[in-house]
Image (spheres, grey):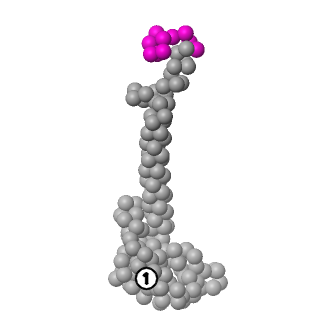
Amino acid sequence: FGKKLKLPASRVRKFLQQSIRDQAAAERMTRNIDLSPDASRLMTGLAYVMGSGMTTLAWAELKKEKPDHSSGTNLRLPYYVRGVQGFSEFDFLVDIEEAAIEQSRDVAEEQYQQERQHAIEQQRKFGLIEDVGRPAKMQKSLSAGLGLPASGQA
């Protein structure tokens, strides 16, 4: 089956973030052939990850393959992917998905930190938080409820 090459998610992510021009080129290349959704996704992924030279090689390999309508797909993916530098269809697709998940996680984390910072600033602005980082009003009411001095010291 050829050598399986596992791409690091960071490398895939870098290519996924490339310009819209690369995506348009990938779509142009796949438009004129009837591909199964998986094959289409793989071709677009290959265009992102490998650059136009390698994609052209993949395209030539793909056109050689005769449609196989009996199985419901128009292309035997493993053979096709094997023809492209020993890529494994499964590893390749998993890595692209891992990168996408990782990227959305990074974005979500960044957004959370920004929102948290904003909330802290707002609370500080309205006197809900003292600089020690504890909610001022809550601390005072807790202290009063427990019969402690307002400073919170027992």
| Residue that badge 1 annotates | 25
**On screen, residue 35 above or below 153:** below
Residue at 45% over, 34% down: 124
Q: Residue at x 45, y 55 (%)?
A: 107
Residue found at the far front of this picture: 126
The x, y position of residue 103, in whole percent, is: 44, 58
Q: Does the image show residue 47?
A: no
Q: What amino acid is at disc 1?
A: Ala
Q: Is residue 64 above or below residue 130?
A: below
Tell me the SS state at disc 1. helix
Asked if 42 appears above or below 153 in the picture, the reply is below
Q: Nearest the camera: 97 or 3? A: 97
Q: Is residue 112 above or below residue 53?
A: above
Residue drawn 44% across and 61% down? 99
Q: Position of residue 74 (x, y in %)?
A: 58, 83
Depth order, front residue of 24/31: 24
- Tell whether position 73 is magenta: no
Horizontal placement of 84 versus 72: left or right? left
Magenta span: 145-154
